[in-house]
Image (tube, grey):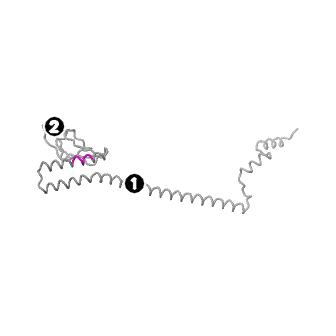
Amino acid sequence: MVPKDETTNDHVSAHHGDTPEAGSDMAAEAPDTGTETLEELNERLAKSEAEATEYLDMLRRTQAEMDNFRKRMMKEHERVIECAAEGIVTELLPLIDNLERALDSARAGAERETLAGGVELIYSQLMTILGKQGVSVIDPGGVEFDPQAHQAVMQVESSEYGENVVAEVLQKGYELNGKLLRPAMVKVAK
């Protein structure tokens, strides 16, 4: 018969992996506490310091790359704005030429109808250019007053228009691609 203590010890050692194979695996996984030499500790410290230096260098390179990227994007944004402005100005140059011709005609005593026709042509060219750029006119005569797009400067009595309807447009409004640039200045019927 086996004494009780021996059975218990055999049972415990079998469950805790005290076999030589299991013990060698556990020794490889668990850190060696208290038995490392000073040389081993110095090696681990040097390795950790090298890793920390490497990570710091990577961080600094990444920060520099992000800074360079931000600077490139700012320059690109400025270039896009310059190109857009250049395109609009190039389209406006013929209008300047036509205005100069109209002024020369006025100074030379051209007839009123001739001047009016020239100014109408210039106005039409300007509106075409602005339309290409996404500008649209807000001319709300006869429509219901909209405080989002209209600026009421006064109310007037009107038999022609119902209450809260734009009776007269004093100054047209403008939108750029759906965004209000300037509200239309209007008189509203009461």
Seen at 58% across and 57% down, the residue is: 55
Seen at 74% across and 48% down, the residue is: 26
Seen at 12% across and 48% down, the residue is: 113
Q: Nearer the viewer, residue 17 or 134?
A: 134
Q: Nearer the viewer, residue 111 or 10?
A: 111
SS for tag 1? helix
Q: Nearer the viewer, residue 177 or 11?
A: 177
Label drawn at residue 38: none
Q: Is residue 126 magenta?
A: yes
Alpha carbon separation for disc pair 1 and 2:
48 Å
| Secondary structure that dominates the magenta span | helix
Q: Is residue 7 above or below residue 100?
A: above
Label drawn at residue 77: 1
Q: Is residue 149 left or right of residue 22?
A: left
In percent of width and height, residue 10 lies at: 81, 42
In percent of width and height, residue 66 lies at: 49, 56
Magenta part of the chain: 123-128
Name the N-terminal-most of marks 1 and 2.
1
Looking at the rendering, in which quadrant would you find the N terminus?
A: top right
For the residue marked with disc 1, what is the amino acid?
His
Q: Is residue 181 magenta?
A: no
For the residue marked with disc 2, what is the amino acid?
Tyr
Q: Is residue 87 left or right of residue 74?
A: left
Q: Which residue is labeled 2 in the image?
A: 161
SS for tag 2? loop
In percent of width and height, residue 11 lies at: 80, 41
